[in-house]
Amino acid sequence: MRPKPSLLNILYSRRTIRRFRKKEITEDVLRLIIEAGQRAPCYYQAYSVVWVKDEAKLKELGELCDSGLVTQASAVLVICLDLHRLRLVLDKLGHDHFMREDKYPAESFFAIFETALLAENMCIAAEVLGYGSAMLDCVLFEFEGVAQLLQLPPGVIPAVVLCMGEKDENPPPRPRWPTDSVLHRDTYRDLDVSEVDRYLDLAEKLLGAEGYLRKYANWNDSYREYLKARTSTTKDTKRHAEELSRLLKQNGLRL
Ligand SMILES: Cc1cc2nc3c(=O)[nH]c(=O)nc-3n(C[C@H](O)[C@H](O)[C@H](O)COP(=O)(O)O)c2cc1C
């Protein structure tokens, strides 16, 4: 195989890190990471980053997230969609803009997309600077608590928490679909059932070898069972989905 240039090496060897050694990340370094995030392709730059520094807030965020990572990490950044700032800009222009309408799915979709690009650039910048990172989804599910804790105005929607710090583990690569299942040539080729089985077997094998589900999810059964448990619908999941849809709509997202 041809040697890979160094940024590719970083992309290939990045893993989500869930064990950190406490070591300060200075404001200068943090700004570099955020600026690198901002260099990602963008649409309206409808995003904001809240750096949570205050110990009491970190503790509360850790409780909301039910995750020790938040208090273990050296920097905790809540990455938000920011439709609030976008609205300020458009209102200032004084025209009849799309946010005054009830439907703008494309703009909502691209705001999510560009926020994800910002977050990913930040992860990679952190890796380049020698730090590991983990994204946590909890802030979306704890939207109201997080909005109150960080005093987010309506329209600022917490998407993920990015926890960063010095790596205290060196995990193996986690499973990915074979590139041939992801890459289509000219037309879309549907998977056959054997490819689905092969992927599930691969995931079972790699995650089993790492002890991933036992370590991080306290789960002792198979990956297939874990996936089923995470994705089954119950009365609770339906209620939560309805609540979240309502909150997102209230905060200006129109999908
Ligand atoms: C939107 C998003 C939310 C995530 N939320 C969590 C989370 O709440 N907890 C967690 O441990 N990992 C979370 N992750 C990390 C994934 O679990 C991880 O990227 C995936 O298992 C692949 O592992 P790798 O990053 O080491 O390749 C999240 C990733 C994304 C993209």
Image (cartoon, grey):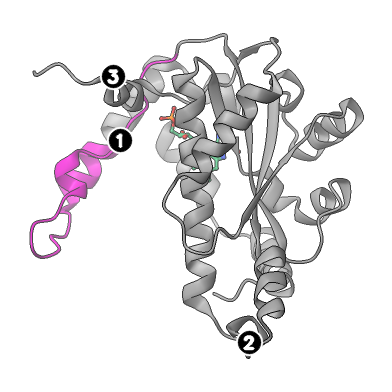
**Crowdedness of circle 2 by 10 Å Cα count: few (<14), some, many (20+)?**
few
Q: Residue at x 8, y 57 (%)?
A: 185
Pinpoint residue 70: horizontal percent, then vertical percent.
73, 27
Left of 228 or right of it: where is 2? left
| View extreme (front): residue | 93
Assign a secondary structure to mark 3.
Answer: helix
Residue type at numbered disc 3: Ser
**Crowdedness of circle 3 by 10 Å Cα count: few (<14), some, many (20+)?**
few
Q: Is residue 2 magenta?
A: no
Q: Which residue is mark 2?
A: 102
Q: Residue at x 91, y 29 (%)?
A: 56
Q: Residue at x 80, y 48 (%)?
A: 146
Q: Quadrant of the N terminus?
A: top left
Q: Do the numbered discs 3 and 1 sit on residues whose CB atoms are within 8 Å?
A: no
Residue type at numbered disc 1: Arg
Q: Which residue is mark 1?
A: 176
Q: Which residue is mark 3?
A: 6
Pinpoint residue 114: horizontal percent, then vertical percent.
49, 55
Between disc 1 and disc 2, whose residue precedes? 2
The span from disc 2 to disc 3 (Cα, nearest Å) is 46 Å
Q: Would you place residue 4 above or below residue 111 in this image?
A: above
Decide whether the magenta segment is chiefly helix, strand or loop.
Answer: loop
Pinpoint residue 174: horizontal percent, then vertical percent.
37, 27
Assign a secondary structure to mark 2.
Answer: loop
Between disc 3 and disc 1, whose residue precedes? 3
